[in-house]
Amino acid sequence: MSHASQRARIHLHRGNLTQARHWYGEAVKEARNNETDQTLTSALGNLGNVCAQMGEYAEAEACYHEVLSLQRREHNPSTVGETLVNLGNLKADTGNFETAKAYYLEAIDVLHPIEHDRALGILYNNLALMELATKQPDAAVTCFQRALECHRVVGDELGLANTFSQFGKALLAQGDRQQAERCLNNASEHFIKLGQEPSEAAVLRLLADIYETRDDHVSALRCMERAVHVDRRYHLPEIENDQQRLALLHAREKEDRASSTPPTSPATFKNQRPVE
């Protein structure tokens, strides 16, 4: 790895995208002058990823197209498919769904024969989100299910967590609360395994919505208690709303307990015979 690439990775890890972009640009220059196509491919791909995160879509697309050209020369279907997924994501992010779908479908044709399930899991999940955006809920459900199958094959816990979460949210929006609850509970379990508590809290808020529609205030209360605990630990911006919601749930739970307590009957006494 070149000095410029190392600097770029450090800044990217720190969240400084501007500096990461600068140093990946320097890495591309170095690779053009001194290194192999493989080094240039890596530098361009990383530069494209950072530009995409910064919303510099034209620059990202130019990087990805050059990467794709280099990868096709190397005849490596794995990397070609991954770059096609990146191009699809880029077009979906800019609302160009027709072109995005074309890239996704081409990526499927490339990745399926080589059973690149990790990339396919990401692809199907992103395709599902795009189908939702274009009002195709049935197609989205099919894509979510395929994404989960791919994630299971490679044991991708994060992929499973994210897909279950997004699938559950989509089912909830469609009114299928029973299936949504199953998906969201699965997502919560995977986020717990991964130690991703803020993501777990986001899922718990949705589960609380489901329980409240059933007037199951106890279950909703437990979800929100955990969510508020996570809010405090990570100083999440949702804490004020979550605390207000928790207070309301405490009040409702008390009302439920009060209304379910049977009224106390007056004490009755048997007539006692005097002791003779």
Image (cartoon, grey):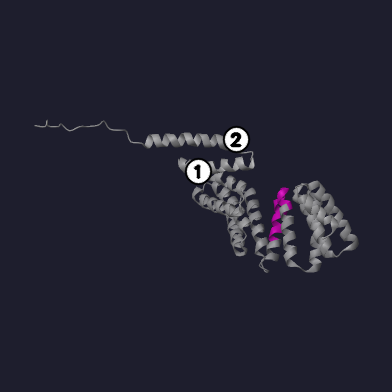
Q: Is residue 95 magenta?
A: yes
Marker disc for residue 240: 2
| Magenta-colored span | 90-105
At which x and y percent is residue 37?
A: 84, 64
Q: Which residue is mark 1?
A: 222
Q: Amino acid at mark 2?
A: Glu
In the image, 81: left or right of 164? right
The residue shown at (91%, 61%) is: 33
Find the distance from the CA under tag 1 to the CA under tag 2. 17 Å
Query: Position of 126 compared to 67: left or right?
Result: left
Quadrant in which residue 67 is drawn: bottom right
Badge 2: residue crowd in 10 Å (few <14, some 14–19, many ≥20): few
Q: Position of residue 60 (x, y in %)?
A: 79, 52
In the rendered structure, the answer to whether residue 214 lies left or right of residue 235 reads left
The residue located at (66%, 54%) in the rendering is 126
Q: Quadrant of the C terminus?
A: top left
Q: Amino acid at mark 1?
A: Arg
Q: Earlier in the sequence, mark 1 or mark 2?
A: 1
